[in-house]
């Protein structure tokens, strides 16, 4: 059973490794990532947000299980081109309730494998371009809050402090494992499929 982990869980800072094996269990994980994303009313979810160390994310801009035809799976994605610049508000399922404006390239060309093993290239602009950049950042251990300017950093500080206090309380009470156990589990999962 997967669940969405929240800031400042250390797996959100993990730099994920490319997948070499996509087996039945991973297909089941992908299915569950879509379900968790829909429950949380999100449009994108990266593997390390469900505590998996793989270069994989899922997207559905319709944010609904009623639109399976717009589901996209990105395995080992590579952003090949970035153009322009645009500011828009972002949020993240791992930092629920926190929103801030982020400046990013306006359009991108991204290649990735889908869950059928086909390599596809997408030219994206606006919101879809923003989503795949946000999710690709996750795979490199980068969160959208890292991309805020000094004023933006200041405006989210209190909320982040609150997340940090709650996480350290959960860890003290044994509800989340210690950092060493988390790292050992990620290493084991990597050795299985990367
Ligand atoms: Co996110």
Image (tube, grey):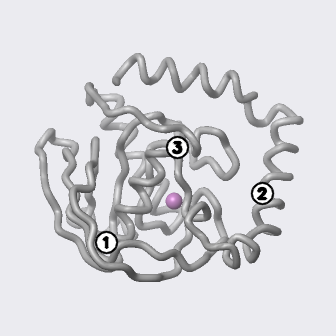
Residue 164 in the image: above or below residue 39: above
Disc ID at residue 50: 3
Of labels 2 and 3, earlier in sequence is: 3
The CB of the residue at mark 1 lies under 8 Å from ligand 1 = no
Of labels 1 and 2, earlier in sequence is: 1
The local secondary structure at tag 1 comes to helix
Question: Which residue was labeled with disc 2?
Answer: 163
Residue drawn 56% across the image and 70% down it: 91
Q: Is residue 93 left or right of residue 43?
A: right
Label 1 with label 2: CB-CB less than 8 Å: no
Question: How far from the left and from the top, in percent, is residue 53?
Answer: 46, 34
Q: In the depicted view, which residue is nearer to us: 20 or 34?
A: 20
Q: Is residue 3 left or right of residue 32?
A: right
The CB of the residue at mark 2 lies under 8 Å from ligand 1 = no
Residue drawn 43% across the image and 23% down it: 190
Q: Is residue 46 left or right of residue 28?
A: right
Question: Which residue was labeled with disc 1?
Answer: 128
The local secondary structure at tag 3 comes to helix
Task: Calculate the distance from the C-alpha at mark 2 to the C-alpha at mark 3.
Answer: 17 Å
Where's the C terminus, which quadrant? Answer: top left
Question: How far from the left and from the top, in percent, is residue 15?
Answer: 48, 38
Residue 28 in the image: above or below residue 178: below
Task: Calculate the distance from the C-alpha at mark 1 to the C-alpha at mark 2.
Answer: 28 Å
Mark closer to the observer (3, 1): 1
Of labels 3 and 1, earlier in sequence is: 3
Q: In the depicted view, which residue is nearer to us: 95 or 161?
A: 161
């Amino acid at each position: 059973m997967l669940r969405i982990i929240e800031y400042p869980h250390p797996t959100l800072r993990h730099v994920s490794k490319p997948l070499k094996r996509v087996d039945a269990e991973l297909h089941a994980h992908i299915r569950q990532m879509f379900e968790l994303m829909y429950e949380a009313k999100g449009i994108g979810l990266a593997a390390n947000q469900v505590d998996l160390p793989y270069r994989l994310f899922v997207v559905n801009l319709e944010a609904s299980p009623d639109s399976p035809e717009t589901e996209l799976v990105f395995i080992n994605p590579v952003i090949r081109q970035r153009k322009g610049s645009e500011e828009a508000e972002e949020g993240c399922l791992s930092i629920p309730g926190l929103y801030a404006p982020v400046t990013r390239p306006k359009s991108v060309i991204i290649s990735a494998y889908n869950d059928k093993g086909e390599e596809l290239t997408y030219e994206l602009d606006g919101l879809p371009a923003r989503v795949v950049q946000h999710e690709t950042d996750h795979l490199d251990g980068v969160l959208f809050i890292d991309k805020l300017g000094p004023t933006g950093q200041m405006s989210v500080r209190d909320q982040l402090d609150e997340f940090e206090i709650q996480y350290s309380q959960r860890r003290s009470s044994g509800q989340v494992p210690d950092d060493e156990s988390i790292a050992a589990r990620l290493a084991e999962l990597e050795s299985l499929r990367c």
